[in-house]
Amino acid sequence: MAREIETVCITTGPAEVGDYVTLNIGPIHPAMHGTLRVITRTDGETIISAEPEIGYLHRGVEKLGENLTYKQFLPLTDRLNYCSAICNNVAYEMAVEKALGIEVPKKAQLIRTIMMELARIADHEVLVGILGVDLGALTPFFYLIIQREEIYEIFEWHHGARLTNSMGAIGGVEADLPDRFHEKWPKMRDTIRKANDETDRLLTHNRIWMDRTIGVNAFCADDALNWGFTGPMLRACGVKRDLRKDEPYLLYDQFDFEVPTGKHGDVFDRYMIRMLEMEESIKIIDQAYAMYQEMPEDAPLMKKVPKIIKPPEGQIYHAIESPNGELGFFIKSDGTDKPYRIKIRPPCYMVYQAFGELVQGEMISDLIACLSSINVIAGELDR
Amino acid sequence: MSLKDRVTECLGTDLIELSEFRGDVCVEIPKDRVVEVMTKLKQEEGFDFLSDVFGVDNLDLYAAKAKKAKKKKKGEEEEEEPKKQGPPPPRFEVIYLLLSLSTNERLQVRVRVPEDDMDVPSVTGIWRSATWPEREAFDMYGFKFKGHPNLRRLLMWDEFEDHPLRKDYPLEGKGEERHLNYDTV
């Protein structure tokens, strides 16, 4: 019996639940984003209850961090949210810099801003593209993924890697913006806008798209705050909260940009927020790039830090606004060259714990839409 | 009024220790008063958002400190007075990261948990966002959160017996293997 169940992944529930069917979705399933498993009890196609199970990609990053030096831990942060690895890198670097009590040079801050916003655009493009694919709209995916590839090209010029970037170092960034960036960016800005425009025209007012997304998984703001939502998921519920505005880091307090908010917290609002945020990111990059061009060419990129980093004894928490929400690093230092305790606060972890409540009473196919719109990244969820 | 003063005033006798490092304020409160203090902080001080809950194991920290103290004693002969041999400090800590959405202030709340009494009151009744973090803290350190609706392992599998983030658990594991069991749903 067990063998049979394993092959079809469908089991009938215990006798007392009556006619409900227990359906295992994942951990290996083409529609699941990574190794996620949701155990659902369904009545026909309606979900009575859903319980996510995680841990299939648990690598013990926090345990490893306790046994690596501060510099050695940096490449591991790439493997958290691999759609926007740069944001993880910078978040970690900034947490260590806070523990050390140093401030990086302005030019390095601008380069970090530019790269992080590019990563944000790439992340949102993947999300919107995949959301379309999961709901049966394949075309926008291609428009968007081409733009993502262009962004990855810039990353490759700058620090030699596309996905697992390991950008920068504790104390600044290792390299100036590549020469080719100066020609590429004005052109790329237009192509990104064009691709977004194209996607917008294909999806936003599309009848099928509207039917599949409007009102699906609507969530109210109070519940969202209670469950610890941050980032686009919280803004879709109508709460105007963005760490770039509320707790400014780097030079974000000098840039002029809007924080788009939704109203209903449904899949459509989450999609729209991401579309609007990409435009805001382009605006931020433009302003940061203008400031960058005013800087002298020989301005320092690195703050002098000791070869072996030993923050003084103490504990700090530093959070930034990653594409998914509040990404925080808690570091407890005991004065040695290795962090005593390192805790990552992944944004999608908090959202995904409410998944059962989000999809209750919806259809199985809406579960997939919900999962895509949350942007659950297994690497960051399981650490 | 600064955050430190406000928190000191709000907590009153519940405050055991207040420390600050790089602008991050951390307060220590007694273990059995967690729910009352958190409710007070939420309602009176506006810390309405729980960012994270996690544990810390201080085993190595104390061991390193004891070693250091021993070394010092040897070097300086018997100039220092011998320290009083009190009971050892509790091994574990649970740290709550609170955030006030209106003032954007962050506060770390620390609870010390001794090894022989791992019960900690759960804050899931105040913030539902503590659901998975508390499960993870149980998984990784073995805290028993009293009042948690579903205190099962989260990242490790159910049959796993150890608590991997404890400092005495080896980095390469103890050779446990997981067998997926689709029968138990």
Image: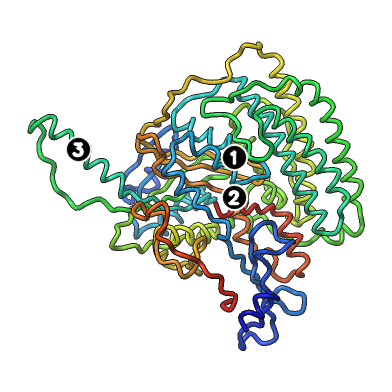
Q: Between residue B41 and residue B117, name the one nearer to us.
A: B117
Q: Amino acid at mark 1?
A: Asn
Identify the residue at horizontal 33%, vertical 56% (top origin). B113
Q: Residue A333, labelled with which disc?
A: none
* Within-10-Å neighbours for mark 1: few <14, some 14–19, many 20+: many
Q: Relative to B136, is B86 above or below?
A: above
- Residue A198 in picture, x, y percent from top left: 90, 43
Q: Relative to A8, is A66 above or below?
A: above
Q: Residue B69, labelled with which disc?
A: 3
Measured in 3D between alpha carbons, the distance from the residue under mark 3 to the one under mark 2, in whole angstroms, is: 40 Å
Identify the residue at horizontal 46%, vertical 44% (top origin). A65
For the residue labelled by badge 1, is the local secondary structure a helix, a strand or a loop?
A: helix
Question: What is the quadrant of residue A144 in the picture?
Answer: top right
Q: Which residue is mark 1?
A: A88
Measured in 3D between alpha carbons, the distance from the residue under mark 2 to the one under mark 1, in whole angstroms, is: 10 Å
Q: Share a chain, discs 1 and 3?
A: no
Identify the residue at horizontal 58%, vertical 43% (top origin). A327
- Residue A98 in picture, x, y percent from top left: 48, 31
* Within-10-Å neighbours for mark 3: few <14, some 14–19, many 20+: few
Q: Share a chain, discs 2 and 1?
A: yes
Q: Which residue is mark 2?
A: A380
Q: Relative to A118, is A51 above or below?
A: below
Q: Is residue B165 visible?
A: yes
Q: Pointers 2 and 1 in contact (CB under 8 A)?
A: yes
Q: Between residue A96 and residue A169, name the one nearer to us.
A: A169
Locate residue A244 relative to residue B76 in the image: left or right: right
Q: Amino acid at mark 2?
A: Glu
Q: Relative to B10, is B183 above or below?
A: below
For the residue labelled by badge 3, is the local secondary structure a helix, a strand or a loop?
A: helix
Q: Between residue B185 and residue B24, name the one nearer to us.
A: B185
